[in-house]
Amino acid sequence: MEMPSNQPIVLLREVGGDRYLPIWIGPGEATAIAFAQQGMAPARPLTHDLFKDVLEAVGQELTEVRITDLREGVFYAELVFASGVEVSARPSDAIALALRTGTPIYGSDGVLDDAGIAIPDEQEDEVEKFREFLDQISPEDFGTNSQ
């Protein structure tokens, strides 16, 4: 949760690097992501669980999720299937589905360059500074610059 607005935020960490990608998401998607992270299975499937079940039923494999773009403060993603089909998706939905299917999530270099925030892994005080930084910013801070 980003303070003081209490808006949910997903932090994607760069593998083999020290950058984090903060993506603001809605409360419903935050719940879906948290359920998947905690291995919780609701009594009735949530939308992302249903989508996973449908993919399995029709024999489609989700091979990767890509965070592809950031325009005017809005992130964009794609679902990539083994068949080669690519489908546009909101990053929050794509992440929730990726967690359920064990699918890797990739951020484009451009998105990481534009919105990634470097935090050295081994430095706890840097992580605290990052948390303080998150308390001071909003999604609008990641809008494109018209210069």
Image (cartoon, helix red, strand yellow):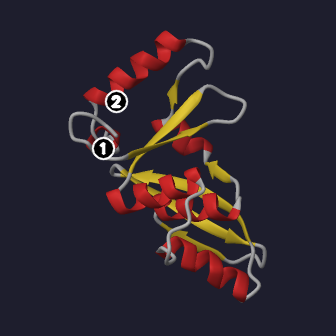
Q: CA distance from mark 2 to mark 1?
A: 10 Å
Amino acid carrying mark 1 in the image: Pro
Element type at mark 1: helix
- Where residue 57 is drawn, which disc sits there? none
* Foreground of the two, 36 or 109: 36
Q: Is residue 80 left or right of residue 76?
A: right
Residue 146 image point, x, y percent: 30, 43
| x, y percent for residue 69 | 50, 54
Would you call the spot at circle 2 few (<14 residues within 10 Å), some (14-19), or many (20 or more)? some
Q: Quadrant of residue 145?
A: top left
- In the rendered view, tell whether residue 109 sits above or below residue 65: above
Q: Which residue in the structure is indicated by mark 2? A: 134
Image position of 119 (left or right of 3)? right
Decide: is 33 above or below 132.
below
**The N terminus lies in which quarter of the figure?**
top left
Q: Is residue 18 left or right of residue 2?
A: right
Pointer 1: what residue? 139
The picture places residue 133, in percent across and down from the top left corner, at: 34, 24
Crowding around mark 1 (Cα neighbors within 10 Å: few <14, some 14 to 19, many 20+) is: some
